[in-house]
Each structure stands twice: as C-alpha cells, then as structure tokens.
C-alpha cells in the first residue's frame, strides 16, 4: 500500500482548509504556551533575586543562633519549617521577634520604621492579653504586622501560592514554630504563657496572614 491508496472521507479542498485551520490553531497554542513559559522564567528569576537577600540574612542569623545555646529551644521547630520549604523571608520575619537587630535589619530593607525595645518585667508574670504592658503589646503587634508584610510587600507569586497551599493544608508545623518563638520571647522578658494560649495566638496569626495574602492580585504564570 502506498500514498496513492490514501482516500480521505472528505473532499480534498475541505481537507486542505481544515488542515490549515488545524495548523493555525496549533500555532496559536504554541505561541500561548511560549508566552506562559517565558513569563514563568521571568517570574522565577525575579523571585530568585527577591529571595537571595533573605536567604543570606537567614543563613547569617542561623549561624549566630546555632552557636548560642540559649536558642536551642527553638531550633527543632525552626528546622522543621525550613525543611517544609517555607520562603526564607517568611521564616525570618517570624524569627525576628527574638532578636531586635535582625528585626530592624529587615525592616530597614523595606523602609519601615525601626523598633526600640528594651522592656523586661522585674518579676515573672503570666501573659494576659486583656491586660498586657504597652511595650509588650506594641512589640507583638509590630511583629504580627511584619509577618504579614513579609508575604504581601514585594511578594512573589510563586512563593505566595506555595505559602497558601502550606498554610491551608499542612499548618501544624508553622503554628508550633510561631508558638515556640512567642514562648521564647516572652520568657526572655520574664513573662510566662501557657502552651494552649501560645498556640491559639499562633493560629490567629496564620489566619490573619492568609486573609491578607488572599487579597493580593496574584499573577498566574
């Protein structure tokens, strides 16, 4: 059997027209796919550039806290979060509560007002969110604001979609991490907090972060 034996069921002229139409359709699909691929590459490069400065800051701070025994309490949960592939800026902003220098360093990067904080209770007291010292209240409020800003200012579409997926489907690790950071911070200023209350506040922070993220106009590439 050769080519001469081929006999399409439609008229030749109709077949040629439909073939040209199909080619045109495929060509358009290729163009569209190419545009999406190019946009993805561009977005990925932009994301990489944004991430680099926070990667370096996180690495620098990790070296500092790993060699300091007082931070041992938070390391296990911290490494779980890093292994879960949360973006470094998000991890770092959460971590910033326990070190004013790193907090101000990253606030400086996005032109935010620097924080002055030197409070310490003269006696150990229980955390009470209905009657909390103004210095502590302001510091925690700045911290929550910073966490939300970390994923809404100069945000990365790719990383933001990843964060949404993690926070909606597997948030236990990040909730424990935030609770541990809060516990560590309050203990350093002579304030105790129960595990349940720390977890509840942590869950609230995640809820507020998700609300803010979902208001963003996230590009689909």
Image (cartoon, rainbow, N blue to C red):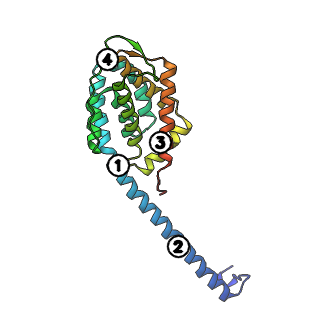
Q: CA distance from mark 2 to mark 4?
A: 60 Å
Q: Which residue is mark 3?
A: 163
Q: Callout 1: 10 Å neighbours few (<14), some, many (20+)?
A: few
Q: Which residue is mark 4?
A: 70
Q: Secondary structure at mark 4?
A: helix
Q: Which residue is mark 1?
A: 48
For residue 182, above or below residue 28: above
Instruction: Please report whichever mark, 3 or 2, sits nearer to the chain's N-terminal start.
Output: 2
* Rendering coords of residue 170 (x, y %): 54, 35
* Rendering coords of residue 165 (x, y %): 52, 42
Instruction: Please report whichever mark, 2 or 4, sits nearer to the chain's N-terminal start.
Output: 2
Question: Viewer-nearest of labels 2 and 4?
Answer: 4
Q: Residue at x 32, y 40 (%)?
A: 55
Q: CA distance from mark 2 to mark 1?
A: 30 Å
Q: Residue at x 45, y 25 (%)?
A: 179
Instruction: Please report whichever mark, 3 or 1, sits nearer to the chain's N-terminal start.
Output: 1
Q: Which one is in front, 188 or 40?
A: 188
Q: Callout 4: 10 Å neighbours few (<14), some, many (20+)?
A: few
């Amino acid at each position: 059997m050769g080519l001469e034996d081929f006999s399409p069921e439609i008229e030749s002229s109709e077949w040629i027209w439909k073939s040209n139409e199909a080619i045109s359709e495929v060509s358009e699909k290729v163009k569209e796919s190419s545009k999406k691929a190019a946009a993805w590459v561009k977005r990925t490069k932009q994301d990489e550039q944004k991430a680099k400065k926070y990667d370096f800051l996180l690495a620098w701070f990790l070296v500092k806290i790993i060699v300091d025994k007082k931070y041992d309490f938070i390391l296990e949960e911290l490494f779980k979060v890093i292994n879960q592939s949360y973006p470094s800026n998000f991890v770092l902003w959460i971590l910033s509560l326990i070190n004013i220098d790193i907090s101000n360093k990253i606030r400086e990067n996005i032109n935010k007002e620097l924080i002055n904080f030197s409070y310490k209770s003269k006696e150990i007291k229980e955390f009470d969110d209905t009657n909390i010292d103004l210095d502590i209240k302001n510091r925690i409020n700045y911290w929550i604001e910073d966490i939300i800003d970390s994923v809404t200012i100069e945000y990365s579409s790719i990383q933001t979609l990843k964060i949404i997926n993690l926070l909606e489907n597997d948030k236990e690790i990040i909730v424990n991490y935030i609770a541990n950071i809060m516990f560590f911070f309050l203990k350093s200023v002579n304030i105790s907090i129960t595990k349940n209350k720390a977890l509840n506040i942590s869950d609230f922070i995640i809820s507020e972060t998700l609300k803010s993220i979902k208001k963003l106009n996230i590009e689909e590439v």
